Amino acid sequence: MKLNQAVKRRLTLPLVSLLVVPLLAWGATPSAAEAQEARARWERMCQIRAEKFDLVLPQAMSENDLDMWIVVMREGLLDPLWEALGRGYVGDWAYYVFTRQGDRAERAALGVGGYRLEECGVYDYFGSASELATFVAERDPGRIGVNMAESIGGADGLSHTSYLHLQETLGRYAERLVSAERFVSDFRATRTAIEIATFAEAGEISREIAERAFSNEVITPGVTTLEDVAWWMSDEQLRRGLGSSFDMPSVYITGPEGIEATSSDRIIQRGDLLMLDWGVGFLDFYTDMKRVAYVLREGETEPPPGIRHAYERALQVRDIMKRTIKPAPTAQAAVDELWAAIVSAGFNRIEFNQPTDDPEVTDVVIGPHSVGNWGHGLGPSLAFFNPTRLTYELRPTTLISIELFAFTANPEWDNAKIRIPLEDDAVVTERGVEWLYPVADRILVIK
C-alpha cells in the first residue's frame, strides 16, 4: 500500500512534533483570555485569604485559647488546608505558622514558597523549614494547635510521622501541642462576605449544569443511559475547570421498590422518575444539591398526580425547615426545634430510609448539614451523621445544605411510597436561612 506524501512527511517528523501537533489541534495553547481567568481565580482566593486571616483567624484562635497554630506539610503529603492557606511549593518539610498577637495573627511560611503564595501578600514572613524551633521559642506560645481531629477529616491533616517529627523539632514545646479540631471548624465555617458570594456562584454553576442534564438537551428517552447523563455532567466540570464534590454524579431512577439503578447503563425510558445528587468544586468551595425529573409518557403533558403530590409534600417540609432554622447555642438545639415544627405540622419522623406502610402519613428524614469547603463541610451541622458538630454553636454565616427525604404514598404504585429528596445550599443569617441561588421548586420535565 502506498502512502501519500503528506502522511510520509508526518511520519518523518521528530517525535516531539508528533506530540505537539495533536495538542495544538486540541487548543492546548492557552489564549490570553484563559490566562486572565486563571489570574482572576487566584486574585479572588487571595482576597478570601486576606479577609479570613484579618477578620476570622484572630477571633477563632482567641475563642479556642490557641496562642499558635502550626500546619505541617511534606512534599507529596499536603494538608487538607493547603489550598485555603495559600498553596505554595513544598520541597521537603514545610510549615504554616500563625501566632496570636492581640487582635491580629502573625503569619509565617517556613519551607514553602512560590510566586502565587508570595505575590498574594497575606504572609508576614517567609523563611526556611530549619527555622521552626527558633521561631517558636522566640514567641514562647502557651498552647499550640495542630491538625489532629477525631471527628473532622479536614482538620486531621497531621500524619503520625509528621507528629513525631514535630515533637522532635520543638523539644520542650512539644508538650504544648493540642488538637486544633474545633478551632479549624470555627475558622473555616465562619464566613466572610466574599466567601459567601463565591460559594453562591458555585451553587449557580452547579444548578445550571444539573438542570441542563435533566432536559432534552442531554436525554433522549429510549436512547440515553444514566451513565451517559453522569458523564455529560463530568465533561462539563472538566470543560469549565471545576472540581467534584462526590466524584461521579449520582443519577438514579426511583420506582415502587425504591432506587432501581444509579449512574449505570440502564436506559432512561418514558415514565421514569429520575433523581440526581451531586456537587461541583469552584475555587475552594464545593456544593451539594439534588434535582428530580420525570420522563413524560406519550400523551402526557405533566407528571402524574401521585408524583406531583409527593413532591408538594416534600416542598412543605422544606418550607418548615427554612422558616424554623435560626442561629442557636448548639446545632442540636436547632434540630430539636425543627423536628417539633415538622411533627406538629402532621409529618411523621422516621429513621433514615425506613418509611412506614401507613399511606395516610408522609414520613420524613432530615439531614441539613454543613457545606462549603467539601460537599459535606465542617462547622456546626444539624445532620444525624455529624454527632460531634451537633454540639457546636450554629452561628450566622454558616453555610448549610437544607436536605430532606419525604416518603408519600403513590396510588399509581399501589400506595408504595415515593422517596422525594430535596437539597439546596443556603446560608444561616440572623434572620434565619437564606437561599444562595434559585432552588428546586418543581419536577423537571423531559419530553
Image (cartoon, rainbow, N blue to C red):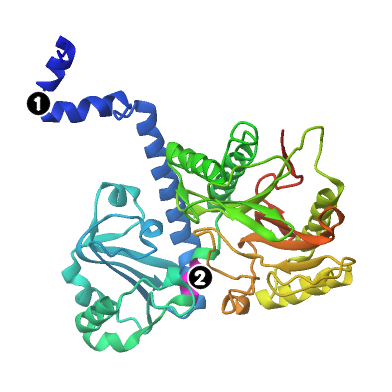
Read off the magenta span: 182-187
Residue wearing tag 2: 185
Left or right: where 86 falls relative to 356 = left
Q: Quadrant of residue 258?
A: bottom right
Q: Is label 2 in a helix, a strand or a loop?
A: helix
Q: Is label 1 in a helix, a strand or a loop?
A: loop
Left or right: where 261 falls relative to 69 = right
Q: Quadrant of residue 354?
A: bottom right
As displayed, is residue 174 above or below residue 56? below
Q: Position of residue 168 (x, y in %)?
A: 20, 83
Q: Residue at x 17, y 16 (%)?
A: 7
Q: Position of residue 129 (x, y in %)?
A: 19, 67
Q: Residue furthest top?
A: 5
Q: Secondary structure of the magenta portion, mostly?
A: helix
Q: Quadrant of the N terminus?
A: top left
Residue in front for this viewpoint, 388 or 210: 210
Q: Position of residue 297 (x, y in %)?
A: 76, 37
Left or right: where 409 falls relative to 282 = right
Residue wearing tag 1: 14
Identified by mark 1, the residue type is: Pro
